[in-house]
Amino acid sequence: MKDTAVILSDEKQIDVFKAVKKQKLVRFLKGMLFLMPSIVLFSLFLFYPLGRTIYLSFFLTDGSGDPTVFVGWENYLNLFTSPIFLKSLRATFLFVLYTVPGTILVSLFLAILANEKLKGIGIFRTMYASTMGISVAAASVFWMFLFHPTIGWLNQILQALGFNSIGWLTDPQWALLAVSISTIWMNLGFTFLIMLGGLQSIDRYLYESADIDGASYFYQLRRITLPMLSPTLFFVITVTFINAFQTFGQIDMLTRGGPQNETQLIVYSIYQEAFMNYQFGPASAQAIFLFIVILLLTLIQFKLGERKVHYQ
Amino acid sequence: MHPVELIGVSKSYDKAEAVLTDIDLSIEEGEFFVLVGPSGSGKSTLLRMIAGLESITSGTIRMNNKIVNHLPPKDRNLSMVFQNYALYPHLTVEQNILFGLRAKKVDKAEQQRRLKETAEMMGLTDLLTRKPKQLSGGQRQRVALARSVVSEAPLCLMDEPLSNLDAKLRAHMRIEIRRLQKKLGLTMIYVTHDQVEAMTMGDRIMVLNDGQIQQIGKPIELYNEPANLFVASFIGSPKMNMGQAMIDNQHLIIEDTVNLPLNVAEIPQVIKRKGITVGVRPEHLLYAKPEEANLFLEIINVEHLGHETLLTFEVGTQLWTAKWLGQWMLEVGQRVPLKLLTKHISFYDSQSGQLMQAPLNKSQLEVVAL
Ligand SMILES: Nc1ncnc2c1ncn2[C@@H]1O[C@H](COP(=O)(O)OP(=O)(O)OP(=O)(O)O)[C@@H](O)[C@H]1O
Ligand SMILES: [Mg+2]
């Protein structure tokens, strides 16, 4: 009597197990169905080109981009012996170093200012966010005029103050800095807006409670605002960071990589290698190298960020 | 010397219509003062003005005889517990409790001493390293209380601190807060929209409606002699039974349906004969033997609460409730004999809503000298 009962319940168990398995399969297929459009699009425009680039990076190509000779790792090895590539690597890192902290600090400052409840603050918010609506091309033209050696406002101001004028985009000492400044300006709108959103979502009660506790403005900034803003800051830093590595438009418009390759950032270098010199193999190698660098740095950033960022 | 005094205080947001008008109020040292009123009546606004978080449109606020209208919150020497507790989500319980002391650069050893003392008092010792997210509602509430206790400010403001808790925990915390306040000798201003909370906790209660003071007094005073129809219907649960009434030839006619003999001499303050609203507490709608009854009503609903029974009757356009002690096995549709005594009736002027004549006989029993 007892035995049969046990067997019965065992059989039931197995049935349940099967049913669960089937349900899981159905759910998986359903999920796949919903993912299909993006999988197709990603494959077509991301995974296939990526695979193709990796493939090309092991070949030399003819002028139309068809692989001719298999060279193995040679394209990669050549990169690290090419002084031009090493210089562009250095330029890229410097550029990231200038633009990321610059963008974050300036837009954080502006966002904190614009978060105050003052009369007419809307005007300032619009103004600070406005660079988001300006295309890189338009902004570059605008900065080109500012940087113009003779009629540019920057030099005119310098002269009015009694300094020598600077060849902003032509002096190898200044070119990268000049491009960085204009890039920071272009980034501001977006980062400002995101940070302002982050600041506004911080509960007002926290500040009121701190007011009653007698915490000073800067104490509140340090102990409440910054920690509460950390997820937003992390997001903005990551996005600006990746964008900085991929900068192309303003380089093309302002300096074309010059003077003396001082502003030849990697993406611009890839562009030149591929579409000026028709060296698709080495260009692909550079592209893959850049991809890996960004991937690694972003991973490191996530690892470090995890500890500091406070998620609600 | 009063810890808090409000003189003719008014408030309007953005020059719109007034949220609070002409509030006069003085709070005694060590008092548990409850501000009660329906949603939107301006309780939080008033509390925030006392805290200094909201500007004052007109009038004066004094604390310990000093005008504080212009003082920022930190210089008013008070603590506040917010409705949503306003705990810092990124800080541990310990850091949350010490936030204010650190901001004020209180000596480290002193910080630790107060932290230890407070944590023990509030039963938080084991939770000090947790983040607010990892706490239950009641524990968060205790952290919020601890934060205000640790500041050792003599005046404590609380804005509906129990509204997020379930009924049982709320009843428990009511007692905790009350005990804490007595033990530390705090002056407490406590906002709630729950009249039970107000009645059970307050030394004195102020009823607020539409930004105007309706009545200030001890809980029992408010219950026995509500100054107007609003307070009468707001304080007490189930609420007071009301009805339009007129007096005609030594008879009180309620809602055109109930006719009670009445000795007008007993109610000298009622000069009007028409336009009267009468109020009767549910516990004063008494059961009577049929021969002693002066009122027969048909039951339309019965609620058994275990220790008492609530009966609902229809009187004209109104629903009246009677509260009887014990378990009464009665059926809907039954006509029950009731006794309604003149001495239990409050008389209000229907037009102004003001009290004309309070019940002659209070529900309070003679206090037995212990
Ligand atoms: N910042 C504000 N700007 C404009 N009007 C406000 C503001 N804060 C509150 N009010 C208005 O003031 C009135 C009183 O609000 P208050 O928050 O004091 O009510 P309350 O009694 O605390 O209500 P509750 O019980 O719902 O918390 C409401 O009509 C509300 O709409
Ligand atoms: Mg409120």
Image (cartoon, coloured by chain):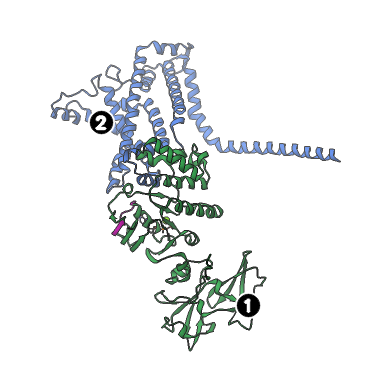
Chain colours: A blue, B green
Tell me if residue B19 can be seen: no
Q: What is the x, y in percent for residue B144?
A: 45, 46
- Seen in the picture, residue B49 relative to B278 is either above or below; the reply is above
Judge by depth and name the residue closer to the eye, B216 or B337: B216
At 39% from the left and 10% from the top, the residue drawn is A81
Tell me if residue B198 can be seen: yes
**Drawn side of residue B21 relative to residue B195, left or right:** left
Q: Which residues are magenta?
A: B52-62
Q: What is the x, y in percent for residue B362?
A: 50, 73
Task: Bin the neighbour count of mark 2 within 10 Å (Cα to Cα): few under 14, some 14-19, many 20 and up.
Answer: many
Q: Secondary structure at mark 2?
A: helix
**Drawn side of residue A46 relative to residue A33, left or right:** left
Q: Which amino acid type is shown beneath numbered disc 1? A: Val
Q: Secondary structure at mark 1?
A: strand
At 44% from the left and 44% from the top, the residue drawn is B87
Query: In the rendered structure, does residue B179 fall within the stretch colored magenta?
Result: no
Task: Bin the neighbour count of mark 1 within 10 Å (Cα to Cα): few under 14, some 14-19, many 20 and up.
Answer: some
Q: Which amino acid type is shown beneath numbered disc 2? A: Trp
Q: What is the x, y in percent for residue B64?
A: 31, 55
Q: Are marks 2 and 1 on the same chain?
A: no
Residue highlighted by disc 1: B336
Ligand 2's image quarter is bottom left
Which chain is disc 1 placed on? Answer: B
**Drawn side of residue A268 relative to residue A312, left or right:** left
Q: Nearer the viewer, mark 2 or mark 1?
A: 1
Find residue A143 and name its label.
2
Which chain is disc 2 placed on? Answer: A
At 55% from the left and 77% from the top, the residue drawn is B315
